[in-house]
Image (cartoon, helix red, strand yellow):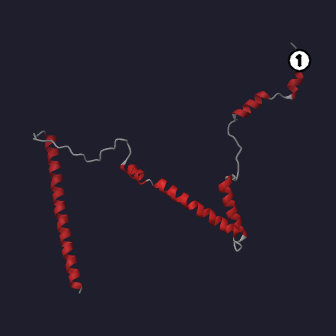
């Protein structure tokens, strides 16, 4: 019972080996012809035809690589955005279900409420850094516009 499978495997294996050997010989001969034609051209021997083969891919007209065009064609970002939009209502319903569930612990309810509030009203920043390396323009304007009391007392009143 195992013999037919083994025999068919061996036949298929031999056919594949022969195909690979023939293809390898074909490409090797083609490569040899290319190299010999390049050497003949370089040595100055006359040839009836000069074949120029592009070894590298031609650049695209718009300057983008094949991978960039391929990924753009997939339109993954749009598909992900559509999927997330479709699942948004279910996610909000789940959060509301967590909040309304009597068996949910208070910390889980608070976390769900906080998440909903951050998404609706915006997340409150944890810290705000008000330090400025250089003096900002508004501080320079205020410095020039504010006069100390001593300067006003020493000034003379000029009437027109």
Q: Position of residue 94 (x, y in %)?
A: 62, 66
Which residue reaches farthest top? 160
Q: Say which element carries label 1.
A: loop
Is 123 located above or below residue 109 in the figure? above
Front position in the image: 62 or 58: 62
Quarter occupied by residue 62: top left
Front position in the image: 53 or 90: 90
Quarter occupied by residue 50: top left
Front position in the image: 54 or 67: 67
Residue on which disc 1 sits? 157
Q: Position of residue 55 (x, y in %)?
A: 25, 48
Determine the residue positioned at 78% across, 28% down: 145
Q: Position of residue 21 (x, y in %)?
A: 17, 64
Task: Answer with left or right where residue 7 lies relative to residue 70.
Answer: left
Is 137 located above or below residue 97 in the figure? above
Is 68 located above or below residue 116 in the figure? above
Determine the residue positioned at 23% across, 87% down: 1
Q: Is the residue marked by circle 1 packed among few (<14), some (14-19), or many (20+) residues within 10 Å? A: few
Task: Answer with left or right where residue 58 lies relative to residue 103.
Answer: left
Front position in the image: 84 or 61: 84
Q: Position of residue 105 (x, y in %)?
A: 71, 71
Determine the residue positioned at 34% across, 44% down: 60
Q: Quadrant of the C terminus?
A: top right
């Amino acid at each position: 019972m195992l013999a037919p499978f083994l025999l068919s495997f061996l036949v298929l294996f031999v056919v594949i080996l022969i195909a690979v050997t023939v293809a390898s010989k074909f490409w090797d001969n083609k490569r040899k012809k290319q190299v010999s034609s390049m050497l003949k051209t370089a040595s100055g021997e006359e040839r009836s035809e000069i074949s120029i083969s592009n070894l590298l891919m031609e650049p695209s007209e718009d300057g983008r690589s094949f991978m960039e065009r391929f990924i753009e064609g997939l339109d993954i970002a749009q598909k992900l955005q559509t999927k997330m939009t479709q699942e948004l209502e279910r996610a909000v319903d789940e959060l509301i279900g967590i909040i309304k569930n009597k068996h949910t612990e208070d910390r889980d309810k608070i976390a769900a409420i906080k998440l909903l509030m951050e998404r609706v009203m915006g997340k409150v920043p944890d810290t705000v850094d008000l330090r400025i390396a250089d003096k900002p323009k508004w501080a320079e304007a205020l410095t020039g516009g504010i006069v100390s009391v001593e300067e006003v007392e020493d000034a003379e009143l000029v009437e027109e």
